[in-house]
Amino acid sequence: MATATTSHFGAGGGIATQALTAKPNKIDSKIILGELQKIYTNLCPEGCSTLPVFAFKSFLSDTQEVATYDEHSGNDEEDVEETRVQKWVHKVFAHPSQAASAQKLVSDDEGITFDGDDQGITFDEFVSYLATPTNSALALPDPKSKDWGRPLNEYFISSSHNTYLTGHQLYGSSTTEGYINVLRRGCRCIEIDVWDGDDGEPEVFHGYTLTKEISFKDVCKAVAKHAFSEEGSLWQGGAGEGPIIISLECHAGPEQQGKIVKIMREQWGDMLVQGIEPEDVENLPSPLELRRKILVKVHFAKYLPPPPKATHVDATAPRDPPPAVADSSSDSSDSELEEMAKKANKRKPPKAKVTRALSALGIYCSSHHFPSHAAQPFTEEPTSKIPNHVYSFSEKVFANLHAQHAESIFHHNKDYLMRVYPFGLRFSSSNADPTEFWQRGVQLVALNWQKCDEGMMLNEGMFAGEGGYVLKPESYRPGGKGVHEDKRNLDLCIEVIAGANIPLPEKSDSPKRFEPYVKIEVHTQAATRLKKKTKAKRNIECTWNEKLEFKSIAGIVEKLTFVRFKIHDEEFGRDDLAAWACIRLDRLQEGYRFINLINNEGDPSDGLILVKISKRVY
């Protein structure tokens, strides 16, 4: 059994990773250890029972593609007591329990010699190196070197759709746990659909459905408590410290909108960004400038309409939206409400006009009506040049717009924010492929986190360990010439060696009947499904020793290319998914690596596979 200390909150937003200083995983699988012993023995020069330090360093540079020095270390004031060699060594053996191993590398570099071969890297130290999270197939970002100082529009931001739901879109439960879950998993943009409550207090629920309402105040309390990691913690992993964007879909009348504003100010206090008029914003700030802050994305409005008349609502019936004062711009929930209205054989009412008091909180994320009738809506309309405007489209609307304005959308998204959300008929909480929207520069690709599907797997690959913010490729940011300048070719070879403690598929309880095979998929803009697989073996621990090669893949952008590892159970008919992992190409480390597996429900597991990776990007 191979064990790993991971979060129990699920994957999809980057929480299924381990910290840079995490303790090495415990490897006690006989099959895995047997394969590692073969590798270790082959590395040892003839006549050596342990691996000499010089041979281990050659292995690091030649096979693992690890630079033998950290060129960026030893230059800052905080690093003056640690040389470049020491800094590099402490990245190879990162945990305090590996201090003795690290000292061997430092001493060797300083010219200190040892008698005999008993001071080389032992087999246990070799296993410990490979089992350290920083040395897995996934290269974790160093929060100290990550650039958090660019404007918000230059980042992909981990985003959730209908965050309050924990299951089906029509009858799933609405709960604050939905918010707690995604925030702890690193989501930085959450959605709140708020309506007039029967008792005069605003409520959160999904209109025209049987979902149970929850208190808006309770949602705000949950956000306040779980939005950020503890003070002083790293930006990566868990909730992190990156700013939260509240995508507020307001269906409440003016009276309860006043309460919505009051509740947010009371519950979020200094965390809430306020005090600046949306019209006065000239540039978007950076995540660093907004550290541990909460932003509200809400419709832009200039005036306060008169309050509507109160109407009686039957609390036992499926919830109908209240009558509204005036129509406004469409947004995330509008297309869904239209579909819900059709299902309920009712007419979708106009959306409530947002009051100025509420709209004034949309300082850096001001939703504006999209000028759909304009000939060049993304480039020539004044609305599309407002620094803090945000356009929101369903995936279906976005596809239609992209067919007409592909180049304009790409250039618009270099400078301004855009949000895309699932089509309203995805009642089972499924997701589209988010890479289709990231490739068009969309920052806020909202997904249904309730379902562990391909979309959420790719979201995990994008945001693993990133704290919810990923800096776009250079050509996707202001000043970049175009989408083609980052495109390269790829040769990828992955030798699948062995697996241990592989999770069983759902409804399966017999390891002896389990016949796992590994399928590897490369997701690129040019070809989304390049697939190859191993032969099936038997049991939760097994060896494959098969090479899967992908040659001359053209048109790849490393930060937008993903390698997905899936383990299926070979059966008659459909082969059930047992476990998976997804890694962004620019984060895929070469050499002998462990891949930590996530089960079919999206939870980190103790399972892992041992692989050897080589890649060539040219």
Image (cartoon, rainbow, N blue to C red):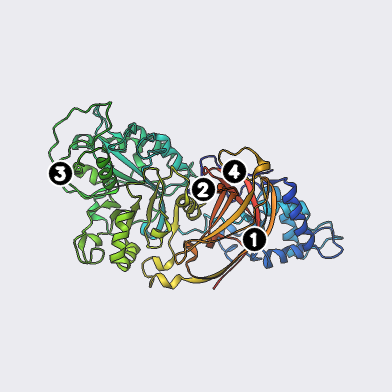
Q: Is disc 2 surrounded by few (<14), some (14 to 19) or many (20+) residues within 10 Å?
A: many
Residue at which label 4 appears = 605
Q: Position of residue 362 (x, y in %)?
A: 27, 48
Amino acid type at image mark 2 = Gly
Which callout, 2 or 3, points to the residue nearer the camera?
Answer: 3
Discs 3, 4 touching: Cβ within 8 Å: no
Residue toward you, 112 or 228: 228
Whichever of labels 1 and 3 marks the residue nearer the N terminus, that label is: 1
What kind of element bears circle 2?
loop
**How far, Cα to Cα, is label 4 from label 1?**
30 Å
Q: Secondary structure at mark 1?
A: helix
Residue 557 % position (x, y): 47, 66
- Residue 89 appears in view: yes
Residue of label 2: 237
Query: What's the amino acid at mark 1?
Result: Trp
Report, in whole angstroms, how far the alpha carbon at label 2 lies from the one at label 3.
Answer: 43 Å
The residue type indicated by label 4 comes to: Ser
Image quarter where the C terminus lies is: bottom right
- Find disc 3 in the rendering and name its residue: 326
What residue did someone put label 1 on? 88
Front position among marks 4 and 1: 4
Which quarter of the figure is the N terminus placed in? top right
Disc 1 or 2, which lies upstream in sequence?
Answer: 1
Residue at 33 percent of width and 50 percent of height: 423
Residue 17 seen by the camera: no
